[in-house]
Image (spheres, rainbow, N blue to C red):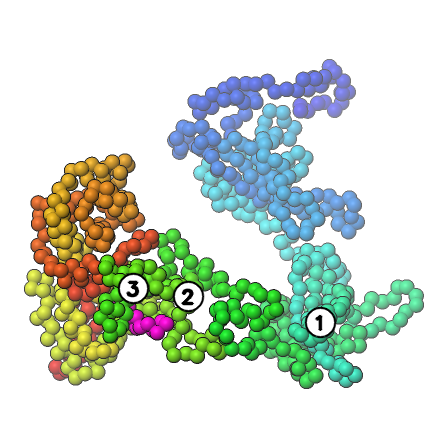
Amino acid sequence: MAIRNPRLPLLPGYGTNPMIGKKNFGVRPIFTSIDKVNMLVDKAEGVNRVPSLYGRKQAPDLPTWIMYDKHILRFQAYFQQTLQEMRSAAHILRKVEIFFYLEDGTIKVMEPRTENSGLSQGTLISRQRIRLPFSYDLYYDVLDLNVGREVTFFGKVFKIINCDNFTRVFMNRLGINVPDPIPWPDAIERTPDTARPPKHRPFRQFLDFDRQVLRFHGYWDDRETEFGSIHLLEIHYFLADDTMEIKEVLPPNSGMEAGPMFLKRMRLPRKIPPRIEMTGGPKVPSYSPADLTIGAVVNVFGRKVVLTDCDPFTKEYYRVTYGFDAFTPLPVPKDEGTECISSSLAERQLPPWNGYGSYDDSAENCRTVEPKAPHRDFIKFLNKDRIGFDSHILRFAARLISDNPVDARRYFIVKYFLCDDTIGIFELGERNSGFKTGKFFRREKMYLPDVNFFVPKEPPAYTDKDMWVGNELVINKHCFRLISADEYALRYMELHANEYPMANITLIMDKIRRILASKDNGYKNFVSKYMEAVVPDKKELMSVRCFKQAMKEIMCEKMTEHEFITLIRYFRGDPGKERSPRREMIRSLVFTELTRGLWDDRSRLREGLLHADPDGSGVLPPSRLRQLLRAHRLPLNCDLMDCMLQVLQKDENCDIQYEDLMNFLDFQTRPVFNLSEADYEKVVRHAPPVKDTECKLWAEAETFISEGFVNWNAFLCQLNLEHLVKEQTQ
């Protein structure tokens, strides 16, 4: 609005303001081009500066809403609001944040919300372009905002005192000097007026200490009276208004009903004031935080309450406020009359188990009349339940230890479920053996042998620490020996080596190191004897058979089968070997079966594989690939087909590369292995199966131990016993 002459009357014709007498205040649309982009603006070109632009040649010529998208200048400011309704103060200081959006030059003012402030805080000025005072077509720009300036938004004067780092860097690039931050007005130190005592401001105390409560534990000894006892109390002191409340803590099974509060919330006077008939009089002093401490005696209207302990928040408050750091709790005197009344439910002696149901189910039925389901370890279930490809199930292959040769050939899979410590046993029946494939023992807790089951407490059961290759488990009078484990179980135990000693390579190497160091010339003789057993072409490698013989010679019976597997896996000398003996053995069996069945239709099989892979990824799931092989009538039984799919190359998702399958079925390169019927029984029939939906590779323990190489140099370097040789030679 134009400034008029104050000496002329406010009448038409006596002023230069074009707004006087105007009825239509609509903004005429104006089209212009900014940064080569046509847009609709509210003013003609050249009237106002284009908001928020970098210097030329510092940024590409792009529209502002693209160049400065999500670029916001943030300032901290305050304004004073007058309080006409209060006589104690003339104004109140309100802190705000000013946001300037560089993309369109709009401004937004927000006040951070303060709990229990009594003010309607939040957005004070919504996002919009704000005109300069006494102007109709000029708006606030980035050049008008800086630290130390005062801006007027709709009649409110805001004092800018600080900005964030992005705003400071942006304005410095524009060549604008940004001053140092200005402290808040309430943070400016003022010399206290010693002439007048400080006033008590209850509202300020409420804002500073709201929801802050000091919590003490204490007791009131009432044994001097008839039928008296010791009352356990809990004292709460509210810092917001210096009030206290006391409630009584009743012991369980005390026979006492929870009555009203021992002391309702109020200001507790230090001394009982005399009864005054007239109104007015001096204010009675009440208890303060300085009067409360461990060991203090509080007079609650003639009842002596002793404070014995406090919570961590109370200790921290006294440590910061008063510098007090001694918080030794006091003992509570025992009440002999209530010892027989209070009893704990957890210490109740349960009757012996009668054999019906599980231990947990029987214990829950004994604790309550209403039958309830037993409580399980829910936290362990959440941590050890199936998460993605982590099944948290340890699978082992097992054999029966029996004098009967028929039972000794039976093959079992033992699954240990980490989520609830249960074990399930499944049998893989051989064709024409008389035994059926399926569940052998249902999934449940398996208890240790030779324990008394009919006792009040649950007997010890097998845990995951008992699951390792070579261990013997006696379950329902059946003795099982764990002979191998799948890849997931071995890797899981190695990743959690601190929980499984059999998979801890550090403990295993320490055991070998102690035994070699305890013998005279033990390490020297050990190295010299087996140095000639290394591979001639590669001096650093040794066969697994020779390495196992060396370990048995020095360790005797002190090393388990699982520890030996851990050593082989850690010092594996041929991890990237593709043509393993296991693969060539299975390929020889497949070649024999295909030749016997007169099958030679590789071109049609390749066409079917390409048709099943429309994306051309080169991989197929094992279930889909098994379906295609059966559709093309490969004369292979299920066991041999599973072993073939097991040795094929796979990706990280356990999908099989079918190009490797075509190379596997190439008849131009004949296999070099000639297997007998006994080799077939060893390689195929007794190989761990892959009939599991988890798609995890099974660790072929028997073949892996008998074939392959070990890095002999890495093993000797890990032992680090060269100093023994030098000492013995000297």
The circle on residue 248 is: 1
Q: Badge 3: how crowded within 10 Å, few (<14), some, or many (20+)? A: many
Q: Secondary structure at mark 3?
A: strand
Residue 358 shown left or right of residue 223 in the figure: left
Q: Residue at x 60, y 78 (%)?
A: 328
Q: Residue at x 26, y 69 (%)?
A: 407
The amino acid sitting under disc 1 is Glu
On the image, the x and y values in percent for residue 426 come to 33, 62
Magenta-drawn stretch contains 482: yes
Comparing 227 with 56, the one in front is 227
Q: Residue furthest left?
A: 536
Q: Which residues are magenta?
A: 472-485
Label 3–label 1 contact, CB within 8 A: no
Q: Earlier in the sequence, mark 3 or mark 1?
A: 1
Quarter of the image with the N terminus is top right
The amino acid sitting under disc 3 is Phe
On the image, the x and y values in percent for residue 118 come to 70, 48
On the image, the x and y values in percent for residue 267 come to 77, 66
Q: Which residue position holds label 2?
A: 444
On the image, the x and y values in percent for residue 13 come to 73, 14
The circle on residue 412 is: 3
Predominant SS along the magenta part: strand
Quarter of the image with the C terminus is bottom left
Label 1–label 2 contact, CB within 8 A: no
Q: Secondary structure at mark 1?
A: strand
CA gap, disc 1 and disc 2: 46 Å
Magenta-drawn stretch contains 2: no
The amino acid sitting under disc 2 is Glu
Label 3–label 2 contact, CB within 8 A: no
